Amino acid sequence: KDSLHSIWIRNLAEESKELVLQSLNSALADKYRNQWQEEYAFLKADRNIAHVLERGFIIRNDEGKAVRMVGSMQDISKIKEAEHRIELNERKFRAMVQSGKDLTMLIDASFNITYASPNHATLFGSTDGELMNLNAALVHPDDYDIFLKETRKLFEQPIMTLTPYRCKVKTGE
């Protein structure tokens, strides 16, 4: 009959097996370590892969030799899937902001520019340092009042549609 340990090893996904066994053996060999933790891919009974977080407490004898391990394994597949979706969305958003034709800026409550999409150099002919020092002065004078009114709304109501307004290029136009 197979031991629990051999069943566990057999169900480690191939891409995880070497790293997990190396990590576990290292923890067991270190007589000063009493805990072990690892995230890895594990084959479920239906042979699908689960992403798991395993934690173990190592019980040692008086000489420091590992004699037993007590632990738990948690299926974190849904967490990993959510992290993957967030990562994909961040990539899409980054691609949209960094290569789009519109200027995307983040401003703080004092109207200081804290981020500007890379296309600002093409649109305004300004460097990062120049743009960051402009704050609200970047806005065309005829649109300044609209800009202030609507931007203040952002701090009260974080999701809204802003009226388009014009900005000045480096030459002041």
Image: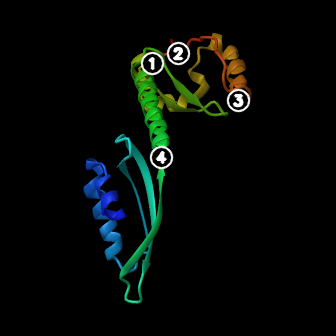
Crowd rating for badge 2 (residues with CA inside 10 Å; few <14, some 14–19, many 20+) = some
Q: Which comes sooner in the sequence, label 4 or label 2?
A: 4
Q: What residue is shown with label 3?
A: 155
Q: Which quadrant is the N terminus positioned in?
A: bottom left
Circle 3 Cα neighbour tier, 10 Å, few/some/many (<14 / 14–19 / ≥20): few
Disc with the residue nearer the chain's start (2 vs 1): 1
- Residue at left offset 67%, top offset 33%: 109
Q: Residue at x 38, y 41 (%)?
A: 46
Q: Residues within 10 Å of mark 1 (few under 14, many from 20)?
A: some
Camera-near label (3 vs 1) is: 3
Quarter holding residue 49:
top left
Tell me the mark number nearer the camera, choosing from 1 and 4: 4
Q: Position of residue 5 (x, y in %)?
A: 34, 64
Q: Position of residue 11 (x, y in %)?
A: 32, 52
Dot 2 or dot 3: first in sequence order is 3
Give, as a three-letter code, the residue at label 2. Answer: Lys
- Residue at which label 4 appears: 76
**Circle 4 — which element?**
loop
Q: Residue type at mark 4?
A: Ile
- How far, Cα to Cα, is label 1 from label 4? 47 Å
Q: Amino acid at mark 1?
A: Phe
Task: Looking at the picture, tell me which residue is in the foreground, 97 or 75.
Answer: 75
Residues at badges 3 and 1 in contact (C-beta under 8 Å)? Answer: no
Q: Nearer the viewer, residue 84 or 126?
A: 84
Tell whether 58 sits left or right of 8: right
Give yes or no for contact between labels 2 and 1 (Cβ–Cβ under 8 Å): yes
Front disc: 2 or 3: 3
Alpha-carbon span between mark 4 and mark 3: 36 Å
Element marked by disc 2 = loop
Q: Residue furthest right?
A: 156
Q: Which residue is mark 2?
A: 168
Earlier in the chain: of badge 4 and badge 3, it is 4
